[in-house]
Image (tube, rainbow, N blue to C red):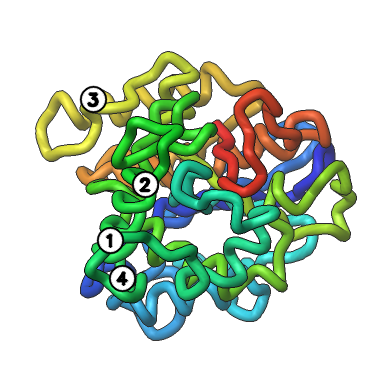
Amino acid sequence: MTGLASTVYGVDFGAGERNAGRKTWIARGAVDDGGVRVTHCETVESAFDGDPKRRNEALAALVGFLSGEGAWETGDGDKYRVEDDTAVGLDFPFGLPAAVLGDEFENWRAFVEVFPDGLPPADDWDGNVVDDPRSLSAWGSHRARENDETDCVHCKRETDATVGAQPPYGIVGKYITYHGIVSVLSEVRDAVTVAPMETDGHTAPEDGPFVLEAYPAGTLGRLGLYRTGYKGTGETEGRRRERNLCGLEQSVDALEIERSVVETATGNPGGDALDAVVAAVATYEATRSADTLAPDEAHYDDREGYIYV
């Protein structure tokens, strides 16, 4: 094996109450000295026992997998588990911008350990607690308005601004941010090492499994592929999904995507399967060495989290 992980996974995250199991996709890449081969891609609903459909059961199945307790059993009978030499890229924001956090948290770990109950108060806000995505967005907006050093209401993190990501508590991001942190990261934080906030140069395989924040649109943009316009049922969108998959193989050294995965990702009109594949590829590239896992310090605040593209 070369690099820090012998297996990588990419997870495109869905937080819908009724369909999270169908909208959350997971892709697997096997790493060896020759590169990485993406071998499987399917929904959480189909990957785990009990066909978890609703958000609570689907995210519980994902947590079991990330914690090393649950197995992904593929249609061909293979079983996969997250082990110490595994890395997983999750496509949701791992944190909030410093503009709304203020100075209350020393680092990311201190933030995630108390989220959402321990968020600092927002003055002149009618709400009392942050207990769902909407209240998270309202709280963040009030905190931003109180901050004399910023002129944003839906503020971005340092890492969001560099890759064109949406504000994590804004109209688009609030659902996956809230449920991703509450239902996934908070549950697995003692079983995984979250990069780069918890690696700090310590990148031996026994420090794994690694979990990191992926952003497929940012990866596609970095590679000069379609970061938008590939989600939909039309012929144009389908061709763009196919072009993105072809472009991934052409752009990333020693990447092979098995034909069954290409067919699945091309045929999934929502683009979620493709995003899972892209997240797995970004995770592979991020875990080639301690250098690739290290953040760009010029655009990194360790209270906020960090996106790997």
**Circle 3: is it few (<14), some (14-19), or many (20+) Cα within 10 Å?**
few
Check if mark 3's residue and mark 4's residue have beta carbons within 8 Å.
no
Query: Given the image, on which type of amino acid does mark 2 rest?
Result: Glu
Q: Which residue is mark 2?
A: 146
Of mark 3 and mark 2, the one earlier in the sequence is: 2
- Residue 36 spot, x, y in % from top left: 66, 37
Seen at 65% across and 68% down, the residue is 189
Q: Which residue is mark 4?
A: 132
Of mark 1 and mark 2, the one earlier in the sequence is: 1
Placement of 130 over or under 175, stated as above or below: below
Q: CA distance from mark 1 to mark 4?
A: 19 Å
Query: Given the image, on which type of amino acid does mark 3 rest?
Result: Arg
Q: Which residue is mark 1?
A: 124
In this rendering, which labeled residue sits more in front, label 3 or label 2? 2
Of mark 4 and mark 2, the one earlier in the sequence is: 4
Seen at 63% across and 39% down, the residue is 301
Q: Under tag 1, what secondary structure?
A: loop
Q: CA distance from mark 3 to mark 2?
A: 46 Å
Q: CA distance from mark 4 to mark 2?
A: 21 Å
Q: Which residue is mark 3?
A: 239
| Left or right relative to 62: residue 107 | right
Of mark 3 and mark 4, the one earlier in the sequence is: 4
* Camera-nearest residue between 120 and 280: 120
Placement of 225 over or under 69, stated as above or below: above
Check if mark 1's residue and mark 2's residue have beta carbons within 8 Å.
yes
Check if mark 4's residue and mark 2's residue have beta carbons within 8 Å.
no
Q: CA distance from mark 3 to mark 1?
A: 50 Å
On the question of residue 253 being in view, the answer is yes
Seen at 39% across and 42% down, the residue is 275
